[in-house]
Amino acid sequence: MFDSLTDRLGSTLQKLRGQGRITEDNVKDSMRDVRMALLEADVALPVVREFINNVKERAMGKDVLRSLTPGQALIKIVQDELTAVMGEANESLDLSTQPPAVILMAGLQGAGKTTSVAKLARWLKEREKKSVMVASADIYRPAAIEQLKTLAAEVDAQFFPSQTDQDPVDIARAAIAQAKAQLIDVVIIDTAGRLHIDDDMMTEIKNIHAAINPIETLFTVDSMTGQDAANTAKAFNDVLPLTGVILTKTDGDARGGAALSIRHITGKPIKFMGVGEKTDALEPFHPDRLVSRILGMGDVLSLVEQAQQKMDKGAAEKLAGKLKKGKGFDLEDFRDQLRQMSNMGGIGSMMDKMPGMANIPAAAKAQVNDKETGKLEAIINSMTPKERKRPDIIKGSRKKRIAAGSGTQIQDVNRLLKQFKQMQTMMKKMNAKGGMKKMMRALGGKMPMGGGGMPF
């Protein structure tokens, strides 16, 4: 996400870092580059104008001109202003009402609305410990009702059945009544997606809103549509009192124009962003953390949260105990590390949040991806238990068999064994210095470690 913007801003800001003196000319030159980077990222022109003006005004202030490190001070201004564009801090869901809290979902067809309902239900269950019921008021697509039913079962949410011959308002009211009877905490009502701003459909969703008076009305929008996403959200907000936005498909969006435009144009906060297809691929939208990632500074806080939620602490403790007894780190442990990373959204997602990744060449980053980690696991799975326990016995004929069994080349097997050796050496050093104990303490605290590091 934001790859092109990160690259462009990174090179521009790198020039500023070493500046011993900030002048109107070098601010002007830098802001011209930043302006082009934002426009290429499909950020709306009014947003770009206001952002550039604010940065210029603050850059020529006393705090920057008198700073011992004026380049760094200017970068801090860029960081602050980008954060302000997107809304300063995360705005969480408002669930402070007599249960059930009702959430109404709106959006254009194809934006990922029904999937977002399931993601949100899972997030509420896992993070907020809420019981959730979902219902579909989309009477125009029988497949939409079936899709939500399937997804509800996947995320273990209650599903309220509905039919295409029912009235959408009646469906929503009946779902809320049943949720109240079952003492459900949150009800999420999915509505019909539309291809464009359609008067009849807008009237329908306004009627649903008036009938159920939801505490949250969320607009689901595809980030890959760029600034059009912000304009569509504004059109909806003009007729429907939105409380927030869910930005979907951000994992496929290299530009980021929607994220940087929506708050400014609609006045509504982005509350969540979809970061993948799976039902656990939903993250609260933290503008400050996202800006940190855009500027190549990483997002350690989100990485910590992911580790605490998704890392298998039992497996990490088992590994720590094993190393403490001097049994060594083998290929089965290495495979466990790969699986831990997969549980945390994959190595691509993790690298995106690590500080300094913007300085690593694109070719090097391309070599470390989820496809490669999947290949590594396939190679390990093709080994016998004895080979996984004692990798030193893997020689010529064994390598040939393992490569054939995993659909890879002998060079791939050699590469895996080399990476494993490096990891094994690192683990020995950590264990000798008491690093595993520190790591386990960190896992119980606030550090994104646990299973013994990452294989890259």
Image: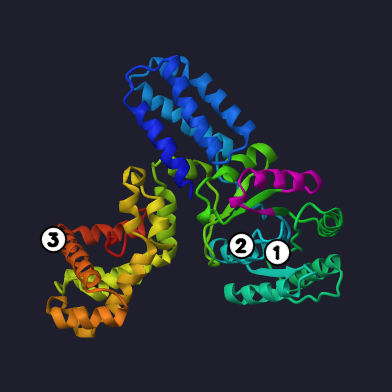
Spatial CA distance of label 2 from label 1 is 9 Å
Residue wearing tag 1: 188
Could you tell me which secondary element the residue under label 1 belongs to? strand
The first of marks 2 and 1 along the sequence is: 2
The first of marks 3 and 1 along the sequence is: 1
Expressed as whole percent of the image width and height from the top left, the position of residue 290 reads 49, 45
Between 205 and 101, the residue placed more toward the observer is 205
**Kind of residue indicated by mark 2:** Leu
**Kind of residue indicated by mark 3:** Ala
Residue wearing tag 2: 120
Residue wearing tag 3: 432
Magenta region, mostly helix, strand or loop?
A: helix
Between 5 and 189, the residue placed more toward the observer is 5
Expressed as whole percent of the image width and height from the top left, the position of residue 308 reads 41, 60
Total numbered circles: 3
Between 74 and 255, the residue placed more toward the observer is 255
Mark 2: give few (<14), some (14-19) or many (20+) Cα within 10 Å.
Answer: many
User: Where does the magenta region start and end?
Assistant: 219-242
Magenta segment includes 238: yes
Spatial CA distance of label 3 from label 1 is 52 Å
Q: Judge whether 268 appears above or below 100 on screen.
A: above
Spatial CA distance of label 2 from label 3 is 44 Å
Expressed as whole percent of the image width and height from the top left, the position of residue 30 reads 44, 25
Displayed quadrant of residue 149: bottom right
In front: mark 3 or mark 1?
A: 1
Asked if the residues shown at circle 2 and circle 1 are in contact, with their CB atoms under 8 angstroms apart, the answer is yes
Could you tell me which secondary element the residue under label 2 belongs to? helix
